Image: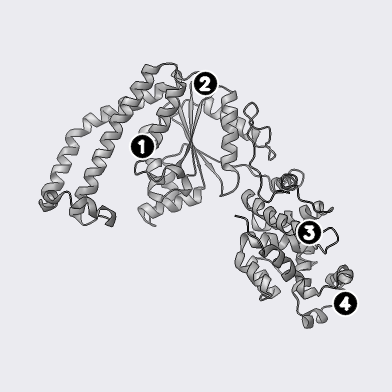
Amino acid sequence: MKLVTPSLVVEELDAFKNDVLHRKQFGEALSNLVTRSTDELVISLDGKWGEGKTTFVKMWQGLLKENGIPSIYIDAFQNDYTEDAFISIASAITSYVEQHSSKSQKSSEFKEKAKKVGVRLLSWSAKIGIKAATLGIIKESDIDALSEIDEDIAADTSETISELVEERLSAHQKESELIRLFRESLSNLPTTLTDNSSGRLVIVIDELDRCRPSFAVEVLEKIKHLFSVKNVVFLLVMHKQQLEEAIKSVYGNNIDAHTYLQKFINVETSIPKRINDPYSNDIQIYINKLLQLHEITTWGDNQKIVDCLTPLAEHFSLSLRQLEKVFTNLAIIYSTSGKNHLRLVPIIVFIAVVKTINPNVFGSLLLGKISFPSLCEQLGFREPSERQERNQSLFWLMSWIRFSMLTESEYQEIDADDLIKGFGQSLWEYNVNRERLIPIFCQKLSMFTVN
């Protein structure tokens, strides 16, 4: 039995070999877009946290390699401790080209041009950051730097700004030529790479939505103005809604973040999901895969777990990552149970999900301090009604939760033909009080927490 979901292995020779969600077709379509387009192309790949974006792009990079298309992977989140997005991207390109270029001279030329552009950008940013103090917009983190520029601070504000503007105007033509040469060098780089039959270079920038807002926005702006050239394709992996919030954080809530983001992206796409297909449902497929990967001894409960977890996953829109956490909880419960112990799968699965998505409600269930109507309200359920409930699996599961949570007086008042009147037969041989069922299973799960 495995408590933590094993990492998916991306095969070197067949990257989509372990593609249980059948995303290879989407990967092939994306590859065709890259090779056939002659534009300066920036593509966004949208998907919520935990939906398998990083796994997909790792597989896709393998497919690109099979098709003779070189690619570079940059984790933006791991680089956002730096103050300059240009350096992060340029250094990744330089490192890759030095290892894979067949023309070392071209590699050296690009590195030198990137160095000059980087120096100019850093120099100007430093001057603006320091001189801005005279306008009263200095940050607390810059106070130390101010002690080194007493003379500048003493200068007249208008005169200082005038000098900056004059300097900027005189340097503009030189810097424009420097950037043009840099972009030209970058555009020519893909043809120097070994085993490149496409003439393209793909740069994948992942985890943009997890970065500091200022760094995420800077990455977008640097790509647009400096790195977006012919023969180089960017794939920006993001949760679009979160990135739009980052844009608002930088430029204020009044900005139209959606329109602003579109200025930097040519083509938008998203992680494909099959949820409503009864014959090929991503959620159900991944649940079955997780049962296999975790190797949990369930004593024949596998199908019941699938039947209970699938409607809950759909109701709560659980991500793949959240499903993995649910299975960690299931593994804990089953590992502390025995073959002849009482196992009520609807309740076990329900609390495994609730602990994943709402620990506060789980704590209330553990202590028996929440009513069934309150539970339904907090988790977005209707109280189950056989006449209204279209999803019979969810109706059956929630009926078990209702059965376990009604007080004795409430239970005695329900109709004799109510479905839950027959549930008590399952408890006869275990001598367990109906109202103790959920706290008992919650207690099993609360003994351990795996992060």
Q: Amino acid at mark 2?
A: Ser
Q: Nearer the viewer, mark 3 or mark 1?
A: 1
Looking at the image, which residue is at 48% across and 51% down? Answer: 242
Image coordinates for residue 149, horizontal then vertical, percent: 16, 49
Looking at the image, tell me whether mark 3 or mark 1 is earlier in sequence order: 1
Q: The residue tagged with tag 3: helix, strand or loop?
A: helix
For the residue pair 239 and 297, the one nearer the viewer reads as: 297
Looking at the image, tell me whether mark 1 or mark 2 is earlier in sequence order: 1
Q: Amino acid at mark 3?
A: Ser
Q: The residue tagged with tag 4: helix, strand or loop?
A: loop
Q: How is the image coloured?
A: one colour
Residue beneath disc 4: 416
Question: Badge 3: how crowded within 10 Å, few (<14), some, or many (20+)?
Answer: some
Q: Nearer the viewer, mark 1 or mark 4?
A: 1
Q: Nearer the viewer, mark 1 or mark 2?
A: 1
Image coordinates for residue 53, horizontal then vertical, percent: 57, 42
Residue beneath disc 1: 86
- Tell me whether circle 4 and circle 3 mark residues in contact (CB < 8 Å): no
Residue beneath disc 2: 198
Image coordinates for residue 224, horizontal then vertical, percent: 39, 36
Looking at the image, tell me whether mark 2 or mark 4 is earlier in sequence order: 2
Looking at the image, tell me whether mark 1 or mark 4 is earlier in sequence order: 1
Looking at the image, tell me whether mark 2 or mark 3 is earlier in sequence order: 2
Q: Amino acid at mark 1?
A: Phe
Mark 3 to mark 1: distance in Å? 52 Å
Q: The residue tagged with tag 1: helix, strand or loop?
A: helix
Residue beneath disc 3: 393
For the residue pair 430 and 163, the one nearer the viewer reads as: 430
For the residue pair 277 and 119, the one nearer the viewer reads as: 119
Mark 1 to mark 4: distance in Å? 71 Å
